[in-house]
Image (cartoon, grey):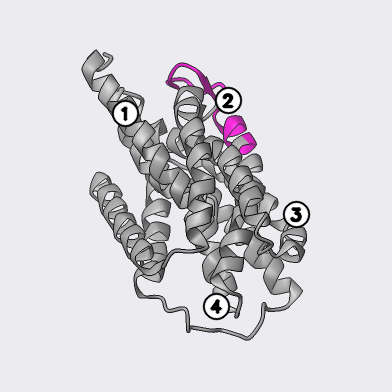
Amino acid sequence: MMPPVAELAGLVVALLATGVVAGLLAGVFGIGGGAVIVPVLYQFLLLLGIDHDLVMQIAVGSSLGVIVPTSIRSFLAHRAHGAVDEALLKEWLLPVPLGAIAAGFLIAIISGEALRIVFVVLATLMALRLLFGRQSWRLGADLPGRTVRVVVGFLIGLFSTLMGVGGGVFNNAFMTLYGRSMHQAVATSAGVGVLIAIPGVLGTIWAGWGRAGLPPLSLGFVNLLAVLLLIPVTMAMAPIGARLAHRTSRRRLEIGFGLFLLVVALRFLVSLV
């Protein structure tokens, strides 16, 4: 049974508000906002009575659908500042999408519960990095050799797609731990989001194609209604976030985002009990 009109209206407002936050995060952190979108869509779909075994997959796929235009716009905004490491992006043109494609195969075969466990583990690691990481931490003065970079690119594509995120936090950590500036890491992460989201969307469409129990207006695990509601707002807010990233102190934003991720991880953990 569908929720009352008032409840649906409230959910639409919540989704639009989420788009504002997700778009700002896309610009500020160089991410696609998926860490915000996935848990909200998860709740949205549960309230609509969607099959519990499919909710997480649909949230992840739909989040990736939103990240495609958001990441592109965020990347173009950051590129205008000249901070993008285009050499690294070119090197990752193959390994990052391959990781995203591999994640699509996994999403097709693992349960929604397993996908939530992945989200809990990775979100917790992301939160701890944001809350307790220090910009002074270094593993090296420059990025490691090509083999390591290729493996890292593949893993960023894999884990980010499984979470329905653009890979910004993972890439930011990698680049800054190896001596790159936060501004360059953020700008480059927006480009990484493009490399993840496009094959990730195609993979999740394939993974969910023909599944019974999908909500109306779905292409596989990508729900077009959720995507269409969120895209305009996130695209409008991403350039604003990009401008803030170049003139705003980041520490409070990192702490707030880290705490949010911990709350989300706890919520998913409770749902597994």
Among numbered discs 4 and 1, the one appearing first in the sequence: 1
Which residue is identified by label 2? 209
Q: Residue at x 42, y 79 (%)?
A: 134
Q: Kindly check if marks 4 and 3 are in contact, taking CB atoms under 8 A apart as contact.
A: no
Q: Residue at label 1? A: 13
Q: Which residues are magenta?
A: 202-219
Q: Earlier in the sequence, mark 3 or mark 1?
A: 1
> Which dot, 2 or 4, sits closer to the camera?
4
Q: Is residue 212 magenta?
A: yes
Residue 21's quadrant in the figure?
A: top left
Helix, strand, or loop for circle 4? Answer: helix
Q: Which callout, 2 or 1, points at the residue further toward the start of the chain?
A: 1
Q: Which mark is residue 177?
A: 4
Q: Residue 267's spot in the image, x, y percent?
A: 26, 48
Question: Against 178, is 155 above or below?
Answer: above
Disc 2 to disc 4, C-alpha distance: 40 Å
10 Å crowding of disc 4: few (<14), some (14-19), many (20+): many
Q: Secondary structure at mark 3?
A: loop
- The type of residue carrying mark 4 is Leu
Q: CA distance from mark 4 to mark 3?
A: 23 Å
